[in-house]
Image (cartoon, rainbow, N blue to C red):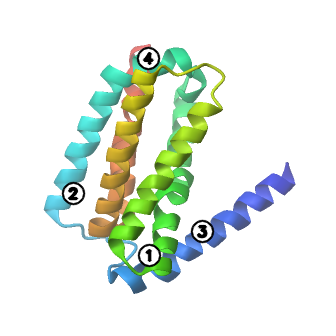
Amino acid sequence: MWFVEAVIFLGTTVLWGFVFAWHTHYTHRPVFTFKVEPKPFVAATLAGLCGAITLHFFLDPSLRLTTPEDYPANLEQWLATTLFSLSFSQLFLVFAPFAWLIRLFQNRWIATVLTILLGVFVLVLKTRSSPAPIPPSLFSALLIVRLVSGVLSVLFYLRGGLLLVWWLGFLIEARHLWNLMMG
């Protein structure tokens, strides 16, 4: 287990190194923006709330049946999955790929599109490795959600830095609190 922890630590250090080394140089914006403009903050809040409501009422009931292990059973699991999502998932799917791709191509649009396509690729790999088959309509909905969340994550990352994307992700993960409090 120590080997896995060491590899994750070193890999994460390298990926955060990509973000801190290249983001500001190529986007001319800071990685952390502590004074976020009101419009992007309101937009991220509304997008997070709309995404949480949409997922809670339309996708989560079906996904709970096919992949129940992806849903927290108690508050401790929710806290762990939320922290993992905010610190690692977004790092692997948005921050580091975007920083690496913008350095590689030196073009925001190409880096944005390829970052979003990476998220779609990971979704396809995850659904193919799922023990239960996912119906095509559910996969289509997941694909749309991944595309929209990818676009929003990159746009908010460029407008407000890490904190704005973390706020969006937190609001979406907070939808699980409703079931934990009521159940």
Residue holding disc 3: 15
Q: Which of marks 4 and 2 precedes in the sequence?
A: 2
User: Spatial distance from mark 1 to mark 3, Cα to Cα?
Assistant: 14 Å
Q: Residue at 48% of width from left, 72% of height from top?
A: 101
> Which label was assigned to residue 31?
none
Question: Amino acid under label 4?
Answer: Ser
User: Spatial distance from mark 2 to mark 1, Cα to Cα?
Assistant: 24 Å
Q: Residues within 10 Å of mark 3 (few under 14, many from 20)?
A: many
Which callout, 2 or 1, points to the residue nearer the camera?
Answer: 1
Q: Is residue 36 left or right of residue 2?
A: left
Q: Residue at 41% of width from left, 68% of height from top?
A: 111
Answer yes or no: do the residues labelled 4 and 3 have beta carbons within 8 Å?
no
Q: Which of marks 3 and 2 precedes in the sequence?
A: 3
User: Whole-percent x and y of residue 25?
Assistant: 41, 86
Residue holding disc 2: 41
Q: Which of marks 3 and 1 precedes in the sequence?
A: 3
Question: Amino acid under label 3?
Answer: Leu
Q: Residue at 50% of width from left, 79% of height from top?
A: 104
User: Spatial distance from mark 4 to mark 3, Cα to Cα?
Assistant: 34 Å
Please say if 70 is above or below 135.
below
User: Spatial distance from mark 2 to mark 4, Cα to Cα?
Assistant: 31 Å
